[in-house]
Image (spheres, rainbow, N blue to C red):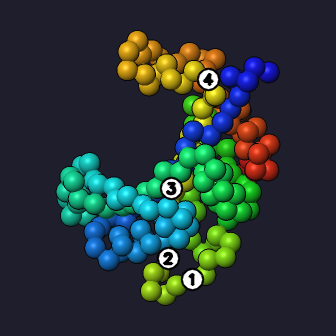
Amino acid sequence: MNTMQEVMIDKVVVNIGVGQTGDRLNKAMKVIEMVTERKPTPTAAKKSVREFNVRPGMTIGTKVTLRKESAFTFLKKAFYAKDFKIATYSFDKQGNAYFGIPDYTEFEGLKYDPDIGIFGMDVAIVFKRRGGFRVARRRTRRKALSRSIRVSKDEAVKFLDEKFGVKTV
């Protein structure tokens, strides 16, 4: 196989949506920092939701983007919390994977803290090939990705099975 066709992880995004600012958002930031060992950034609302008193620009969540080795170490912990199983509907057509973890205490070594409470999180894994993705992101002569450069769902499933021992259910 051509080494430039090799599938790899581009990034892992860990997200906690709180829906409000204040103390609960600070607790979510503390949880995401405990789990990922990285400093989180707050995320802002894009639309207004009248029922929830959410306005555009209001910070309602937090996220962390992990790359390279930190992404691999976090995914080992996250798949341990999910018992190394992921649903087939968690993959999209581009081969990216999305799953949720209902409680941060499912991670190995973390215990429930009554001051924090219970927080779940969403995990998004973005796959890419070693060569070719620059075509869609470069500044000059930007082009759409051909089908041979894109990562398929089957390739993403195979990658997770080989690298992490994750079974699709």
**Residue at image location 37% in from the left, 66% down from the top:** 18
**Earlier residue among tags 3 and 1:** 3
Counting from the top left corner in percent of width and height, residue 121 is at: 51, 62
Report, in whole angstroms, how far the alpha carbon at label 1 lies from the one at label 2. 8 Å
Residue identifier under label 2: 118
Q: Report the disc number at residue 131.
A: 4
Q: Mark 4–mark 1 contact, CB under 8 Å?
A: no
Q: Secondary structure at mark 1?
A: loop
Residue identifier under label 3: 14
Q: Report the disc number at residue 28.
A: none
**Residue at image location 56% in from the left, 58% down from the top:** 100
Position of 168 with respect to 123 (left or right) is right
Report, in whole angstroms, how far the alpha carbon at label 3 lies from the one at label 2. 16 Å
Q: Secondary structure at mark 3?
A: strand
Task: Name the quadrant containing residue 153.
Answer: top right
Q: Secondary structure at mark 4?
A: loop
**Earlier residue among tags 4 and 2:** 2
Q: Mark 3–mark 1 contact, CB under 8 Å?
A: no
**Residue at image location 64% in from the left, 70% down from the top:** 107
Residue identifier under label 1: 112
